[in-house]
Structures are given as structure tokens and as C-alpha cells.
């Protein structure tokens, strides 16, 4: 998928005003996600995303941080300058687009590294 197509999906889902806003939100969410997953998983995901979004995932630490959903959203909010509720909307717009463009098995691998309450952000059913 090309960057313009990815950003168009994020823009539509997030109801953003511009492609630039969609790119800023996408970069912010992926940057925080990269701190939460293993470097190998970040590299696998990066291989599925268009440049320059793939580069954001290569900024990962040696070891993933154990971020719960609330801390993840707090960090997204800090990156975007949004409130936590808006950060949830932003993360959902980006991560559900990721789930649509990345092969299902890759999304399953990614979700296996995250607490179950992240699934909803990817547009998957949450814990019962």
C-alpha cells in the first residue's frame, strides 16, 4: 500500500482535516507502539507499511516497555497534544487501518504481544 492510500484511510477514520494531520497522528501512534513491541515484531510490521511510516517503527528500544492500554494512550496524547479520550480515537484510527492493510497473521502476532484490551484499538473484538 502506498503512503497516500494509508493516510487517506486514517484521515477518513479519524475525520482529520488534512493528510498532514493524518500523517502526524499515524507517526505518533506508531512511535509509541514501537516502544511496546519487540524489535523483531516492529521490524516485521515496518516491512508491511509504506515509507516513512516504516522508519518510525525502527526507533524501538532494545526491550519493549510493559505499557498498559491507559499508559499507551497517555503517551499517544503526549505525542499529539491531545486529551486521553482523543488519543483513543487517534490510536483506533491508525491501528484499525494497520489491521486492514497488514496480513491477518501479522496482526495476530502483534496482538499476541499486547494486553487483550488493545484489540479494540485494532478493530478487533475486545475481551468479553
Image (cartoon, rainbow, N blue to C red):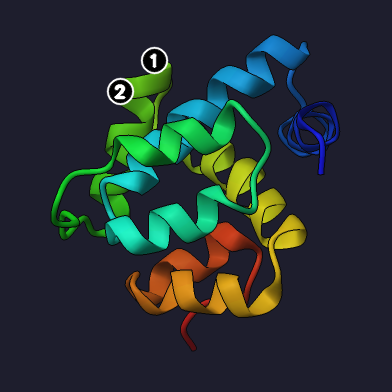
Kindly state the secondary structure of the residue where label 1 is placed. Answer: loop
Q: Position of residue 23 (x, y in %)?
A: 63, 21
**How many other residues sit within 10 Å of disc 1, few (<14), some (14-19) or many (≥20)?**
few
- Quadrant position of the N terminus in the picture: top right
Q: Residue at x 73, y 20 (%)?
A: 16
Furthest toward the bottom, the residue is 128
Q: Position of residue 6 (x, y in %)?
A: 77, 37
Q: Position of residue 41 (x, y in %)?
A: 40, 63
User: Which quadrant holds residue 90?
Assistant: top right
The residue carrying mark 2 is 78
User: Which quadrant holds residue 96?
Assistant: bottom right
**Left or right of 41 on screen, residue 19:** right
Q: Residue at x 77, y 39 (%)?
A: 13
Kindly state the secondary structure of the residue where label 2 is placed. Answer: helix
**Left or right of 97 on screen, residue 39:** left
Q: Residue at x 55, y 65 (%)?
A: 120
**Left or right of 3 on screen, residue 79:** left
**Left or right of 42 on screen, residue 12:** right
Name the mark on residue 125.
none
Q: Is residue 100 above or below residue 128?
A: above
**How many other residues sit within 10 Å of disc 2, few (<14), some (14-19) or many (≥20)?**
some
The residue carrying mark 1 is 81
Q: Is residue 126 above or below residue 27?
A: below
Q: Position of residue 2 (x, y in %)?
A: 81, 35
Q: Are marks 1 and 2 in contact (CB under 8 Å)?
A: yes
Q: Nearer the viewer, residue 102 or 8?
A: 102
User: Which quadrant holds residue 26?
Assistant: top right
Amino acid at each position: 500500500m502506498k503512503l497516500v492510500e494509508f493516510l487517506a484511510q486514517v484521515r477518513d477514520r479519524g475525520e482529520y482535516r488534512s493528510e498532514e494531520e493524518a500523517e502526524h497522528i499515524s507517526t505518533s501512534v506508531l512511535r509509541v507502539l514501537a516502544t511496546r513491541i519487540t524489535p523483531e515484531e516492529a521490524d516485521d510490521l515496518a516491512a508491511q507499511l509504506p515509507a516513512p511510516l516504516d522508519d518510525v517503527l525502527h526507533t524501538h528500544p532494545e526491550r519493549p516497555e510493559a505499557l498498559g492500554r491507559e499508559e499507551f494512550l497517555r503517551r499517544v496524547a503526549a505525542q499529539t497534544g491531545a486529551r486521553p479520550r482523543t488519543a483513543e480515537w487517534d490510536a483506533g484510527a491508525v491501528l484499525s487501518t494497520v489491521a486492514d492493510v497488514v496480513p491477518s497473521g501479522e496482526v495476530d502476532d502483534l496482538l499476541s504481544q499486547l494486553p487483550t484490551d488493545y484489540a479494540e484499538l485494532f478493530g478487533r473484538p475486545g475481551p468479553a
